[in-house]
Image (cartoon, rainbow, N blue to C red):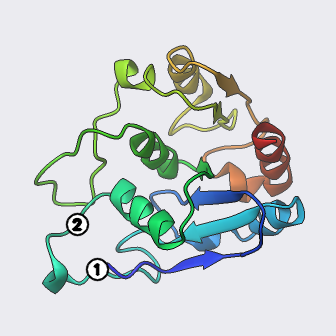
Amino acid sequence: VRLWYMDSGGTGVPVVLLHANTGNADGFQYNIPGFVEAGYRAIAFDRRGWGRSTANSATGPQPGTIAQDLHALVGHLKIDKFHLVGVAGGGFAAYDYVHNNSQQQGAPAQPQRTTITFDKLATIRVPTLLMPGDQDIQCPPWVMRRQLARIPAAEFIVLPEASHSINWEQPESFNRNVLEFIR
């Protein structure tokens, strides 16, 4: 795969942004300046088959996983500790990245490495912020509260008057809450 990514550079702690199952890294255009201004190094990439990232089937089996591509990218950038921010489907990719053992085989589209279950959510040992919009019909707050109950050290914020694309709909609130959490 040839992954397109943007990296603000700098010496700040890296924040890697995972886009939703629609769109690409451009969905963070209103968030990246806020993270950089707060002193962080912002990194976003177009997932395989989205935006400017392309796969080359001659180089090996496809489609791989988002978590594998993320791991390759952070290896390429030589970063070992970073904050991981996923929006919508990018949130599921973030969950998948923090479970490090299982990989689905034979999926026709880029799969997650593991099926996300309540038992697997309970194994997450990193601070986690769940932040749905109060009007999100794809992953409403009640669904996120069920996840919250399983994840140790998780925090929960509901953005009022927001639906599924909270980072796009309310970039200032999204940035403020994420920055406060990662500080």
Q: Position of residue 92 (x, y in %)?
A: 44, 43
Q: Position of residue 47 (x, y in %)?
A: 43, 68
Location of mark 1 (residue): 55
Which residue is painted at 65% across and 75% down in the image? 7
Marks 2 and 1: in contact by CB < 8 Å?
Answer: yes
Which residue is painted at 36% across and 71% down in the image? 48
Residue 63 falls left or right of residue 163 = left
The C terminus is located in which quarter? top right
Give the CA distance from mark 1 to mark 2: 8 Å
Residue 81 falls left or right of residue 58 = right
Q: Position of residue 112 (x, y in %)?
A: 31, 48
How many C-alpha atoms fall within 10 Å of the one at disc 2: few (<14), some, or many (≥20)? Answer: some
Of 50 and 57, the residue lying toward us: 57
> What amino acid does circle 1 point to?
Ala
Of 53 and 137, the residue lying toward us: 53
Q: What label does residue 63 carry, if any?
A: 2
Report which quarter residue 3 is drawn in. Answer: bottom left
Which residue lies most toward the top here? Answer: 149
Q: Position of residue 182 (x, y in %)?
A: 75, 42
Which residue is painted at 89% across and 65% down in the image? 37
Q: Is residue 146 above or below residue 67?
A: above
Residue 176 falls left or right of residue 127 = right
Report which quarter residue 69 is drawn in. Answer: bottom left
Q: Is residue 45 above or below residue 87?
A: below
Which residue lies most toward the right here? Answer: 37
Kindly state the secondary structure of the residue where label 1 is placed. loop
Q: Earlier in the sequence, mark 1 or mark 2?
A: 1
